[in-house]
């Protein structure tokens, strides 16, 4: 069922790799809700992934951009406004990658060149895209920018390694840039802290499967699915959330505020 929540709006969606990607699901829903969108991903992901299928489905095109490269980002915003015939109303930052996680470096023995890459790709990319948009004045008044994050930014989860630090920086950038962009243009910036979800990035985290089932048992509503994450993103792009900014919003079935559950405690009964 659609409600035309995004009718007349233009968006840019970063990070759709395959149909499991949170960005893929959000792009499909944004299209269903009447938005015109541009899809983007790193050039290497365009070769590996299936983004062209999504572009066909959403009747749009893909503009390659490495989210760590300012020239690519400026080109992306300039071309997107040309193709869409107007400024941008919403942006989804759905980007994460840690070479330390990929190569299995323990947190106490990280490769620091990798660490800098993790921060650049997974956190500074939000600042970079916002800076490019701000400079070009590419986002409409009351526009909405959403970035996806994870609770390991607040609460330690060992296997998440340097991604936890990157997510803490990402959430801080949303608050800091949210102040300036809000004051200047009424643009709102939020992060959504999503439940563990089976995607390419999710599956790369050590212990992901066990933790997926653990949080499913703790959260009163269970884990939030990728589809429901997409719906939450749409609500934040819509005009119904115009006064929400600089927030980290937990979308996790109540996991973040539940210390334990009857199910989990029962497994310790003696
Ligand atoms: P995914 O693997 O489908 O998406 C990650 C995307 O980041 C890929 O499309 C990849 O090509 C893109 N990317 C990597 N380096 C890039 C670069 N230099 N420039 C542009 N794009 C680049 O996985 P998923 O799970 O959909 O991840 C999306 C976001 O959601 C990430 O920020 C992730 O940390 C976050 N998240 C995921 C959770 C999960 O359990 N899957 C839970 C909470 C947050």
Image (spheres, rainbow, N blue to C red):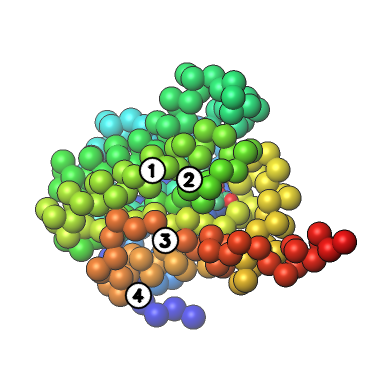
> Circle 1 is placed at which residue position?
170
Specify which label sits upstream in the sequence, 3 or 4.
4
Q: Nearer the viewer, residue 179 or 103?
A: 179
| Marker disc for residue 5 | 4
Q: Secondary structure at mark 4?
A: loop
Cα distance, mark 3 to mark 4? 20 Å
Cα distance, mark 1 to mark 3? 13 Å
| Marker disc for residue 1 | none
> Circle 2 is placed at which residue position?
153
Q: Is residue 112 above or below residue 67?
A: above
Cα distance, mark 3 to mark 2? 13 Å
Q: Is residue 149 above or below residue 254?
A: above
Q: Is mark 1 within 8 Å of ligand 1?
A: yes
Q: Is residue 206 above or below residue 235?
A: above
Task: Report crowding for label 3: few under 14, some 14 to 19, many 20 or more residues within 10 A (C-alpha).
Answer: some
Q: Position of residue 96 (x, y in %)?
A: 49, 40
Q: Secondary structure at mark 1?
A: helix
Specify which label sits upstream in the sequence, 1 or 2.
2
Residue 165 left/right relative to 135: right
């Amino acid at each position: 069922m659609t409600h035309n929540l995004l009718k007349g709006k233009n968006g840019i969606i970063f990070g759709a790799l395959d149909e499991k990607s949170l960005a893929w699901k959000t792009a499909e829903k944004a299209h269903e809700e009447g938005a015109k969108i541009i899809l983007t991903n790193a050039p290497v992901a365009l070769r590996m992934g299936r983004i062209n299928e999504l572009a066909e489905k959403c009747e749009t095109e893909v503009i390659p951009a490495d989210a760590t490269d300012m020239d690519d980002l400026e080109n992306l915003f300039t071309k997107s406004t040309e193709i869409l015939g107007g400024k941008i109303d919403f942006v989804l930052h759905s980007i994460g990658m840690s070479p330390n996680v990929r190569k299995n470096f323990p947190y106490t023995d990280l490769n620091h060149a990798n660490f800098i890459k993790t921060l650049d790709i997974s956190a500074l990319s939000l600042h970079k895209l916002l800076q490019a948009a701000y400079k070009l004045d590419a986002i409409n008044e009351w526009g909405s920018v959403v970035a996806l994050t994870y609770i390991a930014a607040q609460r330690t989860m060992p296997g998440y390694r340097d991604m936890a630090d990157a997510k803490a920086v990402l959430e801080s950038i949303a608050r800091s840039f949210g102040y300036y962009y809000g004051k200047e243009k009424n643009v709102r910036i939020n992060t959504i802290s999503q439940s563990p979800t089976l995607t390419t990035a999710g599956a790369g985290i050590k212990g992901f499967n066990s933790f997926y089932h653990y949080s499913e048992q703790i959260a009163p509503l269970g884990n939030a699915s990728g589809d429901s994450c997409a719906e939450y993103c749409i609500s934040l792009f819509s005009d119904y959330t115009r006064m929400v900014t600089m927030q980290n919003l937990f979308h996790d079935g109540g996991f973040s505020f539940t210390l334990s559950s009857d199910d989990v405690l029962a497994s310790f009964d003696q």
